[in-house]
């Protein structure tokens, strides 16, 4: 069977993205499906010029795009990211048109309340995504000046750090002192190298800690010593 070696058309790519999202939905709701059957269905229709393998590879490209955005992807399609940027942009565009990618929620913000709303939305809706990869964060958080100076922070970094702490202070190991009205264990996120001192807003520079340890890191006489014991590098070694 002669298969086309030509670039994928918009229509072909869209058929692959639609089928991928269909499978992702089935998978995330725990319903069974057959990748082989769906692949066959695609070849019987829009993708009649493509081989089974090339469709599989496209699915892996879609996984790579979702993985890059820290969104859930189908575990059976290992991300294959060596794909042209034109195709990747097309895939992103299609995913966002289908509502699978909400860019707005990932935009950094200096507004505390807005940051927190985004963090909450990320934590409640994208639990799986948070564990699919470590957010890259912002190396030099943009400075925003109003009456007070603050920094635009990455909601995904704050959400990831709180989520992975899993309700336990990363400094003293105690469980969060109380739950919020939403039932979430209350922890605070601290930048080991302060943003005000030019520290990055990344997971490597942040810890989720109880209010007690947080105040201690800021105000205690032994704060330098305490800090050296509890930065993330130290925690990972322990
Ligand atoms: Zn603590
Ligand atoms: Zn702090």
Image: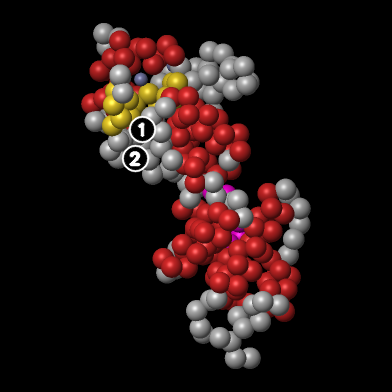
Q: Which mark is residue 152?
A: 1
Residue at horizontal 66%, vertical 64%?
A: 19
Magenta stretch: dominant secondary structure: loop
Vertical comparison of 129 with 8: above or below: above
Residue 54, position as x, y percentages in the image? 56, 76
Q: Which mark is residue 207?
A: none
Residue at horizontal 59%, vertical 17%?
A: 179
Nearest the eye: 187 or 110: 110
In this picture, residue 106 sits left or right of residue 33 = left
Q: Which type of secondary structure does the marked residue at label 2 adopt?
A: loop
Quarter of image, res 33: bottom right
Residue 189 colored in magenta in the image: no
Total number of numbered discs in the rendering: 2
Range of residues picked out in magenta: 71-78
Residue 91, position as x, y percentages in the image? 52, 62
Point out the tag, 1 or 2, that comes first from the N-terminus: 2
Residue 10, position as x, y percentages in the image? 56, 72
**Residue farthest toward the top in the current orientation of the protein:** 221
Q: Which type of secondary structure does the marked residue at label 1 adopt?
A: loop
Separation of disc 1 and disc 2 at Cα? 9 Å
Residue 74 colored in magenta in the image: yes
Vertical comparison of 156 with 210: above or below: below
Nearest the eye: 236 or 153: 153
Closer to viewer: mark 1 or mark 2: 1
Q: Is residue 232 visible?
A: no
């Amino acid at each position: 069977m002669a298969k086309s070696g030509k670039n994928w058309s918009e229509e072909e790519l869209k058929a692959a993205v639609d089928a991928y999202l269909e499978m992702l939905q089935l998978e995330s709701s725990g319903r069974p499906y057959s990748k082989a059957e769906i692949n066959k269905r695609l070849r019987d229709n829009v993708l009649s010029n493509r081989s089974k393998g090339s469709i599989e590879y496209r699915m892996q490209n879609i996984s790579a795009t979702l993985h890059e955005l820290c969104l859930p992807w189908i575990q059976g399609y290992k991300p294959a990211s060596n794909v042209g940027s034109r195709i990747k942009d097309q895939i992103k565009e299609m995913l966002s048109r289908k509502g699978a990618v909400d860019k707005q929620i990932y935009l950094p913000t200096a507004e505390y309340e807005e940051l927190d709303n985004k963090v909450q939305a990320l934590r409640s809706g994208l639990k799986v995504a948070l564990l699919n990869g470590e957010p890259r964060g912002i190396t030099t958080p943009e400075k925003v000046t109003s009456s007070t100076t603050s920094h635009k922070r990455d909601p995904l970094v704050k959400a990831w750090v709180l989520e992975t702490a899993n309700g336990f202070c990363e400094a003293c190991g105690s469980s969060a002192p109380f739950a919020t009205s939403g039932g979430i264990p209350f922890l605070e996120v601290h930048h080991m190298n302060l943003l005000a001192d030019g520290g990055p807003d990344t997971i490597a520079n942040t810890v989720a800690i109880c209010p007690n340890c947080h105040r201690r890191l800021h105000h205690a006489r032994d704060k330098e010593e305490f800090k050296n014991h509890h930065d993330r590098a130290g925690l990972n070694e322990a």
